[in-house]
Image: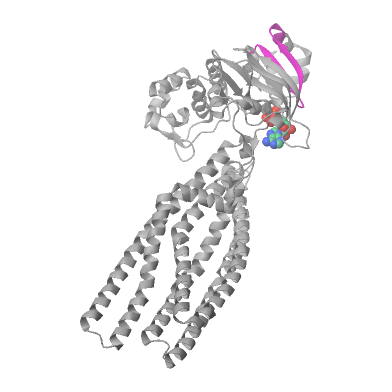
Amino acid sequence: MTRHEKGMDSVATTTGPRLAVDGARGAKGLVLGGFAVLLVSVAAEFAGPLLVREYVDQAAGHAEAGELFSIAGWYLAVAVVGILASLALGYLAAQSGWHVADHVRLRLLRHVLGGRVLDLESRPAGEVLETVEGNSDIIGRSIAEAGFRVVGNLIMVFGMIAIIFAVVPAAGLGVTLLVVLVAIVLVKLTHRAVGLWKTARARKAELFGFLGDGLAARDDLLPLGESRWPGTRARREFDDLLVLERRAYVGGRAFWPLTQLFFAVSLGIGFAVGLRMLGVQQISVGGLTLIYLYVDRLRGPLEEMSAQVDQVQRMFAAFGVAAATLNTPTRGPASTSAGVTGAPRVTFTDVTFGYEPNALPALRDVSFEVPPGGVLGVVGRTGSGKSTVVNLLCGFAAPGQGRVALDGIDVTDLHPSELARSVVVLSQRSHLFTASVRDNITLFDETVPDDVVLSALADLGIESWVRSLPDGLDTVIGAGGRTVSDGQAQLVTGARALIRRSGLLIIDEGTSRLDEETQRRWSELIDRAAEGRTVIMIAHRLETLQGVDALLVLSEGQVRDHVSGADVRSYLDGAAAREVLSEVDEFVEPMEGAR
Ligand SMILES: Nc1ncnc2c1ncn2[C@@H]1O[C@H](COP(=O)(O)OP(=O)(O)OP(=O)(O)O)[C@@H](O)[C@H]1O
């Protein structure tokens, strides 16, 4: 079985409605409570006109004042119950909305973060954020503001029509025909509007992706005099989005004039038929008042629904987009829970891997082995496949053919949390979070004691600098916090590797030139972090390669040379190295300087 057949991918299939039901199941108590209260609220709405009919008929029949007071008292009590139920419904709807939204949010986050890192990295951060948060937010709001009420309004409309039907069948028939007509138009409108909202949501996600990129690149754009460009382009895109959203909004709201027409015609039918029946004494004055009150009360739910339908359409679109996101393939479950302890043996066996199906593979038939505790330097010119080796080792992708293993266990079979415990990456390009120095080092793991963090900082020679900060380890650094130099940032993120006892250390040396002091500290950090571990080092400097046990030279995705032991020194001094390494810009200067 090839790696591909064995497959990392699994496809969950869900639909918008199923996602909604799953979310509602998690908030079962709230949803059931909401519906129970809704029924009370609807019953109160129905009871009002019935009590009025009773009152009018009793008054016309010269009933005692006590009886009339009693009916009025009931009317008041029903009204109070209706108001209380309505308040409770608002609260339960808000709670249910946020529960369902959280369910969707969590599933989207798990899916997006649990998937292959390379898939996630191929999408702008802003777009991912909009897809997760934008859709969850719409779902939460729509349920809170419209969820129960739409159902309540539907029950009211159908219930009132049924009562009109029972009291004046001809009027009920007329109104029923109208409802069927309105429902057909509404379904068509909703279908169209949901499609338009989905397009608008996709466009919005793209736009946020662009905005995120624009913000991230502001330091680069400013010196180039292009700092206004993201703003100008974003404005154009916002204009386009406005047109799209307006079309969806207007499309959805076309229901409003329809409800007005429906109401006017229903009132006409009710009165025309009711008055005729009153004339032939088939109905009492109270009965006619009841018809009038019910038809009049239809106006409220219908008007509310014309606004709510728009919200419900957005909600359907958001559930649809969320379900489509969840249906994209993601990493399947790991087939072993076995772990790797200590410094592992790393093996690449005939590995071929391509990012794109039809492009030349980034790695072709690559094989090498690093014994436990060994240090392998990987070099090669830009695009030769060095980072791809790291991506496969970190389980970010699975090789198309061949095998990547730690102590004989396929990397893709290791559970992500097990892999995270086995591998640590020390990179000059690590991200600094807007968070305290402590959190930046522990990566928000509160179980790591301060003395472990301080000891790592002491090893790196920056403990006194951290202690001198206004809040010590609690000082917030990164964007929006205290600014630190590139060298300090590198050491703080480097401390992450020191506090973890993972057996495999991957060092990803950036290509940026560092000043002498930072370079010295980086080299010390590497020495310190490498102790007792298997090390794979993507190197760009001759100096970094001094301590390696073996050297892997990649060229266009293939192993060009693989030397070990004493041969490393002679290789680095030899003509072949000169030829290979001179292809790498970063080597030219230091190599010449070193000779
Ligand atoms: N996410 C990706 N999607 C598609 N192609 C990619 C991706 N990452 C890398 N590649 C391609 O794979 C090949 C190997 O890239 P890789 O990043 O492994 O090279 P590298 O040796 O690490 O380069 P550098 O020294 O510039 O970082 C290149 O042709 C590159 O364009």
Q: Quadrant of residue 412?
A: top right
Vertical relation: 46 (above or below) 595: below
In the rendered image, the vertical position of residue 506 relative to residue 18, given as above or below: above
The structure residue drawn at horizontal position 45% and vertical position 47%, both measured from the top left corner, is: 26
Q: Position of residue 103 (x, y in %)?
A: 49, 46
Can you say which quadrant of the picture contains the N terminus? top right
Q: How is the image coloured?
A: one colour
Towards the viewer: 510 or 330: 330
Is residue 68 shown left or right of residue 570? left
**37 on left or right of 568:** left
Residue 155, given in percent of the width and then of the height, sits at 46, 67
The correct choice, above or below, for 174 with respect to 133 in the image is below
Residues in magenta?
548-569
Q: Position of residue 340 (x, y in %)?
A: 56, 19
The question of residue 586 being in magenta is answered with no
Residue positioned 55% across, 69% down in the render: 253
**Rendered location of residue 502, percent (x, y):** 53, 20
Reply above or below: 531 against 14: above
Q: Residue furthest bottom?
A: 279
Between 221 and 366, the residue placed more toward the observer is 366
Q: Residue at x 55, y 61 (%)?
A: 313
Q: Horizontal placement of 556 versus 213: left or right?
A: right
- Residue furthest left in the image: 66
Which quadrant of the structure image shows residue 437? top left
